Amino acid sequence: MIRMVATAVALACVLGAATLAAPEPGGEGGATAVVPIAPVRQPLACPGPLEIPVGAISSGDEVLDSGSADVTYDVTPTGRPVGAGVAVDAPQAVSVERVGTGDIAGLAGVGCTPPAQDQWLVGGSTALGASARLVLTNPTASAVRARVQIYGPGGLAEQDASVLLGPDSQGTLLLESIAPEVTATAVHIRAEGVGVSAALQDSRLDGFTAAGTDWVSPVEPATSLAIPVAGASTDDAPASVSLMAPDGAEVTLALVTEDGPQPWLGDEAVVLEPGVVTEIQVPVAALAAIQIEATAPVVAGARVLVARDAPLDDGSLAFDHAWTGGQDVSETRSRALVVPDADVTLVATSPAGGTFTAEIDGETVSVDLGAGVLASLPGSWEPGTVITSSHAAAWALLVTDADAGFITTVEPVVTELDGRDVTVTVGSYPLVP
Amino acid sequence: MSPARIIVRAVMVTDGRSPHLAAALDAVLSQDPAPDAVHLALVADLDPPAAGWDPRVEVQRVDAPDYGAAVQQILDQHEGDGSELIWLLHDDMAPMPGSLAALTATARKRQLAGVVGAAQVQWDAPDRLVGLGTTTTRVGARRIGLVERDDVDQGQYAERDDVLAVSLGGALVRRELWDVLGAPQADPEGWTASLDYCRRAWRAGFDVVAVPHARIRHSQERLYGRRDGAGGGRRATYGTRRAAEWFHACVYAPWWAPPFLVLWAILASLARAVLRIAQNEPRLLIADLLVPWRLLGLLLRLPSARARARRAGRSTAAELRLLAGPRQVARHVRALEWGARSRIAARQAPSDAVRAELAGLATRRRLALATLALALVSLSVSLHPSWLPGLVRGQMLTGSILGVTDTSLGVLWDRALTGWSDQAFGAPAIDGGLATLLLPFAAAPGGLAVWLGAFLLLAPLLAGLTAWAATGAFTRSLWARGLAAAAYALWPIALESAAAGRVGAVIVHVVAPLAVLGLVRAGGWHRPESLSDGAQHPPAVRASRSAAMGAAAALAIVVMASPVLLVLVLVVVAIAGTAAGRARWRVWGAALPPLAVSGASLAAALGTGLASGQAWAILAREPGPSGQAEALSAADLLLGGIGETGSVPAPFVWALRALPVLMLAAAVAGALVGRRRWLSAGALGSVAVAVLAATAVQGLTLSPDAGADSPAPSGWYGSAMSIAALGSIVVAAAAWRPHAADRPGGMRRATAVVAIIVVAGAAVGSAAAQVWPGRAALGDVSPADADVLPLVAALEQGTDQRQRVLVLDSDPDGVVFAVLGTDGADAVSTAGTLLDSGQAAVRGPDSPPLPGPASLSDAVAALVAGRDEGIDALAQWGIGVLVAAPGADGIADVLAQSPDLRLMGAADRGTSWRVGAAEGDARVSRATFVGPDTVPVSVPMGRTAADWQAPAAGTLVIAEAADDAWTATLDGAPLAGTGDELGRQVFSVPEAGHVHVQYDDRTYRVWFWAGVVTVAWSLVAAIPVPSRRAREEDS
């Protein structure tokens, strides 16, 4: 009997034990420290003068020559040479070049940028007649390796590139040599440590006729962004916008002008496949901006074309173009640009509206922004004037040479120094992959 | 000398303690012809018998310390002729009729016979021989009887005459010889007195002759220790006999030999001690260990004994011829051993029919075992198809939990012996952990990588075989054994443990069945073979000493591999001992080795206070590889913890999931229908406790394998669940009736056949699911080349500077880094050493937390941010090489920018940079000396010790975590040691001199050796070599 009881008790114990729930699991990760790294101001790097993509052809005929005698190139403020480029020890600087004639006739302006570890350049093409020249500048005293990945309408290009830059040196990379026949490119540049400054020269040629040259400036991925200069767009000279979401996104586009929101022909909502550069034509409009809302971080840039009569005088048109990058409209860090020696118009837009305020030469300037409006402020500021704003808006300086039919934009550069947080975890290392 | 008339003077000496005195006197007096004179020498006061002494006996009280002196006194008082024969008699020997006639006839015939000995036979069984002459080896340290003990006297020795020696008891000694040699020497305690006396007789020119027809009953009161009332049997006098034999060897050896003989005696006693351990004969063990000391005590008498032997004369060819040669010694030993064995075999011999059936059963059993083994080998190899080729190629198995497995014997030995763990910046360990267990693997040719890899690979096979052995103790049904073993081998959690490299749990899974087998045989609860007629063979099972010790060793190994099982082991052993009856102490003794190997951890757990929760983490620590795992409920665990199965066909998945359910169902059914209810209840109770432990342990945070600051694992349920699985198959197997499936007809047979088919189907399906190519991986262990770090980095670790290597890798959240003192993270030698607040468990919760790599976080962050301000902090901990892991290109790019780092090389294993100087005194080093010029100078150091000449006064800095057990001496004088602000060990050196630094943890060593000795003892004692006595008692 007692044995039966013992068996029953033992069975009951097993059943009882079987009802135990899983405890909160023990264990913990390795010691993790988030270490703030104090920022150090590095020199800005300006990419230097434009280069004729296929080399200068000199025939003595100014119309046919690919080069030009009518070139002005200014970097404000001035700095020291780094390769062909210029390193400037100032929080902001601008480089504007005007080429009067030849294959790369036009205005090309760019705000000089400090070295960065991770940046995107949205713009350029490696299709026939186009050249995308990536200029990487290392204005620091450390050697840097930069890794370049190219995205296009077909997604990430098979080949990527790695460029080793010595201290105070510059390297250029013709993207067509890596990923030819990509009609719209977005370039991802990563460089650890101090980082690298990057800019992309997008030059296009239509036969013997210049079809536009400009610098593409770096942009950062964001979910709510605006491109301050995305028009005028005309039937002859349609503007276009390039969008790319590294992880894919759904985006909604809104076209705004000084007169308010404009209808977008076709679907406003666009689905972006991961890594695929999507190019969309901008509807006909006057000076316009595009506001973008996305479900995941996207990078964007707009190319605005200005038509002029071709120098051959055969009725065909020549173009200049201007690339403007999409800016995070929630960016509240202080940004600044330097006014170049040209006709300039300050344009700003923000989906939230409000009053755009900027410090110009020590004076505060305010512009009312409607929610769906592009505000423009033509200025006659002295060259070298610094415009600073920390307003959460997308803004830029539209630089034009109306007589020559040239256009470019200068985008502000963040002047605040970013402290970085590095997360460091103690782990284990048993494996070789 | 008159050949016509020989006087025989019988002298019997008594101390009155023999019960056979009267019978002995009668036997002497009734001889025909009777002795001419019969003397009874009383060496103690003795009352005459009621009827008075026989008038023919001349009774005399003598005052003599021993037998020879007593006889001498008698002879001194009774002059006699040289031809007189003295009949030396004990009070426990009775000459059989005609003995004296036979002896005197021989004495008359052999004029030179100085000693004429009789055949001694058993007192109660006069047809059994006790002795008929003895000899010894050339060395003389082994006395060899010339008849087999208890041999039946069938006249087979009738021809025997000249022998080296006879027993003086009952022998005739010619007075002439007695006058030459004097009385036999009683020292050392007489055991070799006869041998000594006879050899001297040979040397003195006399013969020693044995007379087989003269038979004397001898009750051997002294040999069996009965004379002093102790009654200890032959073993009681074993030690003194052995010592006397060695002494005899010393007496008759050449003049230079005695020191070597003493040395030999010491070695022989140690070797015999091991044998005694194996035989489980503690009294003989002590006796054997005491033999050399007894011998040393006797050596004072050696000169006089050698002088006596020399006086007797030189050794003669006759004497040498009669010494035993090696062949005779071998025959003697064989006769002793096989004699005992064959006597038992003869007693137990089954009938021919039974023998034939047993042979048939054995053939079927071997066939079944071979089939099972073949199936399990195929399963083991197919489970991880890449492992075997990898191991054959010379690769090691490695994984995120397992770590590297090519740890060298030297490192493991140093780790086990010193207790200093290399993890992080070093830590004092509680115990040797797996390092001790894995030493045999590392010592085997091929090293740890091969054997540990083979062990993990063949774990299902090994577990199946041990489970087969264990279930064989509960059922003799081959189907039940085979299926239970297969189910146990296929236990999903154990397969997961092996695939994830959780070595401790795998060891438990393989060894635990052996512990069960040992315990069951130790208690005598195992099933004998059951025969077709319902009889059993052997008819009665006996508790086994060796099995108890085997269980002890297996339990110790189980507890070393998985300390959390200690409590379960103690409970099981306690209950089993209670039920073991006479064998209870033997069974309870099996708890000693597990306790000995857990001693240090129990002390540490008690030191932290059982209420703190920390104590449980210590008791549940996992030596060797451990890691985090998803927590499962008890029900999930009982169902085998099967998670994702991957793309396995559905029927196989069902089989996979069904097998644990069937194991449980079989256990429950077994508990309900089985007849061995106590066993079932005990086993089920163990299952319940194991499930409880397995569930609870998941909630514990254990000591991190990689040392302070590194990721801490949660408890792993694998080992406890192996016990649960084992308990289930034990209950099921114990309930299985023999021949259940063989007997024709009836429900029982149908049920048995259905059960066999269902379980076999589930086992086959489960095996198929486990080896299916699309099966979701159970773990990440895979073969890899043994070099983990770039060669340039690993080389720096092996120099005298013992530089550490900082490995940096990137992950989505930032940077992960590890500090490595070895080529890859070594988890197999770690042993749960830290409390969760970072203190060394063995130093208690009040000790300061051990420094860990987290103190380098700022330096590492600065490095990966492109600064080099942290380099000094790295060098202070002896980090001489930075390695950017393969794929961490970003980190490599940043490190490449640092002007203070020098690129050593880029390789598949990562890119390495050197910190500090490449050569000379300015190299980064584990130990540095800061002298008067304040520039740190590299000091060569071993793993836990350094010897070095200090050039001047200064400070010696050891880049290891400070601990009281670090000791240093300057020219032999101890130096004061302390921890610096970083937590490193520093010694202040007051002047130039020879500095010796060592990690010397005495408490650890005591526990370590206690554990090693007890486990080694039980392992040796588990060898089934019962002593003759044990065999005879058992039979």
Image: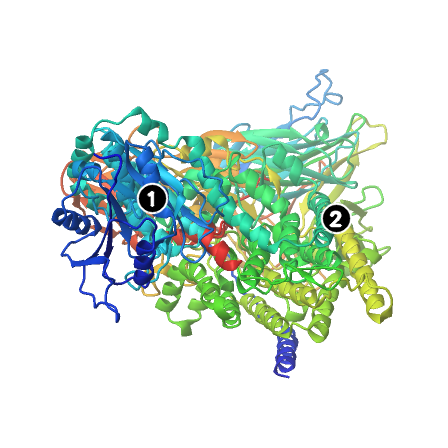
**Residue corresponding to mark 2:** B771
**Residue corresponding to mark 1:** B269
The image quadrant that residue B230 belongs to is: bottom left
Which is nearer the eye, B183 or B109?
B109
Dot 1 and dot 2 residues touching (CB under 8 Å): no
Q: Using a 10 Å C-alpha cutoff, classify the residue at mark 2 as few (fewer than 14 neighbours), some (14 to 19) or many (20 or more).
A: some
Examine the rendering and report whether any part of residue B931 can be seen.
no
Q: What element carries label 2?
A: helix
Tell me where residue B665 appears, x and y as whole percent. 73, 69
Q: Which residue lies furthest to the front in this view?
A: B4
In which quadrant is the N terminus of chain B drawn? top left
Query: Callout 2, which amino acid?
Result: Val
Which chain is indicated by disc 2? B
Which chain is indicated by disc 1? B
Colour scheme in use: rainbow
Which is nearer the eye, A166 or B188?
B188
**Residue B803 against residue A363 in the figure, above or below:** above
The image quadrant that residue A365 belongs to is: bottom right
| Left or right relative to A390: residue B852 | left
Q: Which mark is residue B109?
A: none
